[in-house]
Image (spheres, helix red, strand yellow):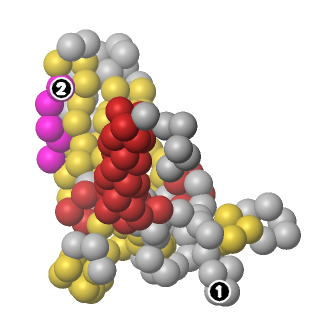
């Protein structure tokens, strides 16, 4: 410390430095796990990559595209087509019907999936290819009714997307 600093200024500088170190330690302890999910390099096409294998974090709409179709009145299918080397978690699927201010769970059926050990959730059922969830909603669908679709998936190389919720406006009857 320079000779011109008073003792009070020196104590204040030490407290400020100690607070800075505490904040830095908190960032390192809490921020690094989240940063581990981010890409650390960029390829020449401008896409995000991770390391030498050139794995790119796809936008959610490319990683897990989906569409809704009506198989017959009141019976719908929500079809997902995961990108290569991407998979969806069976346990993360959920469907609800929103009409006005009310929401109701919708029962659904999924085909058998692939059993695997996942680095994030342990033993799971995964879907790597086309998967169709079958929903029985009923024939009387009010105007403005929304199908709420919940899902989550990961890339084989270690990037896990956060849980997603999408909306689809159902045709009224």
The reply to whether discs 2 and 1 touch (Cβ–Cβ < 8 Å) is no
Q: Which residue is drawn at 20% across and 63% down?
A: 91
- State the CA–CA distance, disc 2 to disc 1: 44 Å
Task: Residue at 74%, 68% (x, y): give it.
Answer: 42
| In front of the other: 23 or 135 | 23
Q: Which residue lies furthest to the front in this view?
A: 3
User: Disc 2 marks which residue?
Assistant: 103
User: At 25% from the left edge and 13% from the top edge, which residue is drawn?
Assistant: 100
Rendering quarter of residue 70: top left
Q: In terms of secondary structure, what is the magenta stretch mainly?
A: strand
Question: Which residue does the image show at 20% across and 79% down from the upper left?
Answer: 122
Mark 2 or 1, closer to the camera? 1
Q: Considering only vertical position in the picture, is 99 above or below 25? A: above
In this picture, residue 56 sits left or right of residue 141 = right
Image x and y of residue 55, in percent: 62, 77
Quarter of the image where one finds residue 143: top left
Which image quarter is the C terminus in?
top left
Q: Residue 23 carries which label?
A: none
Camera sees residue 58: yes
Where 13 sits versus 172, above or below? below
The residue wearing badge 1 is 53
Query: Which residue reaches farthest right?
Result: 44
State the SS at label 1.
loop
Residue 65's spot in the image, x, y percent?
Answer: 53, 55
Q: Which of 61 and 107 is in front in this view?
A: 61
Q: Sequence-wise, which precedes: disc 2 or disc 1?
A: 1
In the figure, is residue 2 to the left or right of 8? right
The span shown in magenta is: 103-107
- Residue 14 placed where, x, y %? 37, 46
* SS category of the residue bearing label 2: strand
């Amino acid at each position: 410390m320079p000779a011109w600093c008073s003792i009070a200024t020196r104590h204040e500088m030490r407290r400020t430095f100690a607070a800075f170190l505490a904040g830095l330690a908190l960032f390192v302890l809490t921020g690094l796990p989240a940063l581990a999910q981010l890409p650390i390099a960029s390829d020449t096409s401008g896409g995000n990559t991770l390391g030498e294998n050139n794995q790119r974090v796809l936008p959610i709409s490319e990683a897990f595209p989906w569409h809704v179709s009506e198989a017959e009145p009141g019976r719908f299918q929500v079809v997902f087509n995961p990108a290569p080397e991407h998979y969806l978690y069976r346990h993360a699927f959920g469907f609800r019907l929103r009409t006005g201010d009310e929401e109701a769970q919708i029962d659904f059926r999924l085909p058998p999936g692939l059993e695997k050990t996942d680095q994030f959730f342990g033993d799971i059922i995964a879907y790597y290819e086309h998967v169709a969830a079958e929903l029985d909603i009923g024939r009387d669908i009010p105007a403005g009714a929304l199908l709420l679709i919940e899902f989550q998936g990961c890339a084989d190389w270690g990037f896990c997307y956060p849980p997603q919720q999408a909306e689809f406006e159902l045709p009224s009857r």
